[in-house]
Image: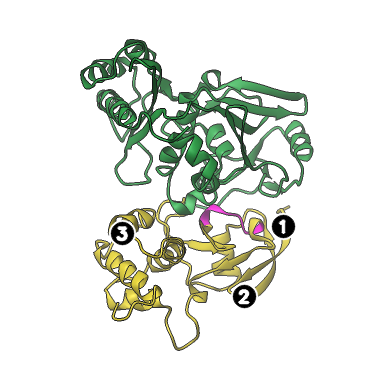
Amino acid sequence: MADRRRISVTINGDTYEREVETRLLLSDFIRHECELTGTHVGCEHGVCGACTILLDGMTARSCLMLAVQADGHELLTIEGIAPNEEELHPLQQAFMDNHGLQCGYCTPGMLTTLLEFLRDNPNPTEKEVRIAISGNLCRCTGYQGIVDAALDAAGRLRGEAGA
Amino acid sequence: MKPPPFTYHDPRTIPEVLDLLAEKDNARLLSGGQSLMPMLNMRYVLPDDVIDLNRVDGLSGIEAANGSLGIAGMTRQRDIEFSDVVASRCPIMIEAILQVGHRQTRNRGTLGGSLAHLDPSAELPAVAMALDATIHVESKRGKRDIAMADFPAGYMTPSIELDEMVTGATFPLWEEGHGYAFIEFARRHGDFAIVSAGALMTTDGAGKVDRVSIVVSGVGPSPLRCTDAERMILGQTPELELFREAAETARAFDAMEDIHAPSSYRQHLAAVLSRRALEKAQTRLGGSNG
């Protein structure tokens, strides 16, 4: 008989209680059980970074965690980044303005990764940005637009006018 | 790409973990999950029981005492990366850990997981080998310490029994002002290294090398100490020509061959990277670390 557990996970401020199989990946829990499909699943073995979420404020690859491991923890996914329904987060706006995405598949992972990175490194160099996103694969942009967006967002988040 | 069915356990204490390990004959310990989870997703491993260490008390922490650095098994790589005491007393570990995967993986990945997984190109086992670390393991039968030199039993196989777990490691610290370097060659930053090299060095009052340690990983099935090169450098004045000659001995290792690189290329990298590590370590002699 399948090994199941009842878990409670807070995602973007909302609490989700579900009974799940213990082998269920956190990425599948987020997408299939909570129907938050903004978190993308690319490789399912921790290489592409598309499924990156924040677990208690720190990035993690949700395909490399079991849903049961998130029981009692707080997650932030792409759906929880914008301040409200109308406005984008400055990082999202910078991606839009700098051609930081084309197909959009890698974007949720790029944004969650950069959210943590810019929080910890508000004034990064281009090289530091490139290292920060080295665990996120994009097959469209050639990364230049993403790097530009990250540096632009860093300026906006520091509150620099005209950034 | 989904894990196979297993029974999940999330014990809260070390004795509970050890009881489970003694009782279950096809169990896997889940620490940071940055290697075991992909292996489960790809079904390279098919355990009947997964024992999660993430809710076990008393398995993480960093402490410097008596000339050594003690790091508990479940200490996250992130916590090592941002540790002031590691940065000031054992900077080679910081230089190495910045090349371990990415921020997202270091937030979860642990010291004990990396040591027990023993990937031939992994950085932390290489640092443990360079520093002559002691690995602490525990089972229901008791505790024991294993010298890092004796820890690898073969390719990705630590010399521990099925009922034992790695609880931590102790790294002897080098004196203040030692030179150090850890460098690697990988296709992209954060990828598995093809070859990496680490070096530690001190000199005496006359400027002669009185202690040196050189390690290469990604060459053999586990990290290798370059003892021939160490012997050539010990007692000598550190200089580029000496480093070049000594590092050439790394070409003699019987190197692995796989889809990423033939053995001749790994031998070449072992020589080049160990020379560069020695050069970089020399430039840092007399610094404020240690």
**Residue B54, position as x, y percentages in the image:** 66, 48
Instruction: Give the quarter of the image for residue A122.
Output: bottom left
Q: Residue furthest left?
A: B241
Instruction: Kindly identify the residue that appears in the image at 42 percent across and 44 percent down.
Output: B98
* Amino acid type of the residue tagged 1 in the rendering: Arg
- From the image, which quarter does the C terminus of chain A lie in? bottom left
Chain A colour in the picture: yellow
Write the start and end of the magenta stretch as one range.
A63-68
Q: How many marks?
A: 3
Which of pointers 1 and 2 indicates the residue nearer the eye? 2
Q: Nearer the viewer, mark 3 or mark 1?
A: 3
Disc number at residue A125? Answer: 3
Q: Does residue B246 sit above or below A41 in this rendering?
A: above
Q: Do the dots labelled 3 and 1 sit on one chain?
A: yes
> Residues under labels 2 and 3: Cα distance?
33 Å
> Can you tell which mark lies on residue A4?
1
Q: Residue B279 at x, y = what percent? A: 28, 28
Q: Is residue B186 visible?
A: yes
Q: Chain B rendered in what hue?
A: green
**Snapshot quadrant of residue B227:** top left
Element on which disc 3 rests:
loop
Query: Is B41 or B64 nearer to us in this picture?
Result: B64
Q: Can I make out residue B162 in this image?
A: no
On screen, B135 above or below A151? Answer: above
| Residue B50 placement, left or right of B77 | right
- Would residue B161 be counted in the magenta stretch? no
